[in-house]
Amino acid sequence: MRRAVFAAAAALALLAGCDPSRIGVADRATVTVAGRDVTIAAPAGFCVDPASTNVSASGAFVMAGDCELLGGRPIAEGDADPIGAVLTASVSAAQRAGPGTLDELRRFAGTAQGRAALGRSGSSDRVRILATRSRGEVLYFLIEDRGPQPVQGIEPRFWRAFLEVQSQMTVLSALGFEGAGVGPTEGLALVQRFADAIQRANPT
C-alpha cells in the first residue's frame, strides 16, 4: 500500500504545481488573500508542502499529506503504513463570507449547479450529496463523484468542509486513496481535525 499511496500523493503534488524533487515540510502555511493573512495549519500526522502552495488573484491553494511521505520525521517508530489521504484547502478571494453564507451554500448544494461545484469532475449528473453535517460553524458535505477525475487513485467519496477564516470563505477536502481504508467515517474525522487546526491557528 505504501507504493500506491506515494504514487497517488506524487500525482496530486504534480497537479498542484509542486516539484516532487523539492518537497519540504512544515506544519502550516500563511497565505495572503484579499489583503488578509490566512494560516492553513495541518492536523497531527500531516505536514503542509510549501512547494504546493499556490496564491493568485482568485485565492490560494494549500495541500497537506503524510509527514513521512513528504520527507519529514516519522510520527512513530517502525515501518507503519502511511496515512492514506491528503488534505487540501482553498481560500477564496471572490467575496468575503458573512452571516447566512453557509445557509446559502446548503441550499446551493441542492441544485445541479451546486453539485457540479462541490464535485471534482464538474459533471453534476455524476455527483451526489450523500450527507450534510454542521459543527462549530463549519458545514460538511459527504460527496460522491463518479465523473472523470483529475487524478487517478482517489476514492470517489470524500468530505468537503466550508468555513469562514479571517472572513474569507475557505473550502477543505479530505481525499482518501483507493484501498487505503479511509472510509466516510475516517474522512469526516480527518476533515474535522483539519478545520479545528485551522480555526485554532486563526483566532477571531
Image (tube, grey):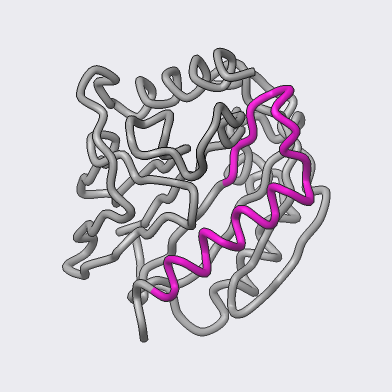
When the figure is inspected, residue 62 is found, relative to residue 93, above or below; the finding is: above
Q: Residue at x 64, y 45 (%)?
A: 113
Quarter in which the N terminus is drawn: top right
**122 relative to 20, above or below:** below
The majority secondary structure of the magenta stretch comes to: helix
Does the magenta segment cover residue 190?
yes
User: Is residue 183 found left or right of 135 in the rendered image?
Assistant: right
Q: Which quadrant of the structure image shows residue 124?
A: top right
Q: In percent of the image, x 61 and y 62: which residue is there?
A: 192
Instruction: Verify whether residue 17 appears in magenta.
Output: no
Residue 11, x across and y down, in percent: 44, 18
The furthest residue to the right:
130
Q: Using the rendered view, name the quadrant where residue 202 is placed.
A: bottom left
**Residue 78 percent across, percent down from the top left:** 54, 32
Picture layout, residue 34 above or below residue 18: below
The quarter in which the C terminus is drawn is bottom left
Residue drawn 42% across the image and 43% down it: 64
What x and y, as percent, mark residue 170?
44, 61
Residue at the far front in the pictured view = 77
Report the magenta residues as a range: 174-200
Residue 193, x across and y down, in percent: 57, 62
- Residue at position x 75%, y 33% from top? 181
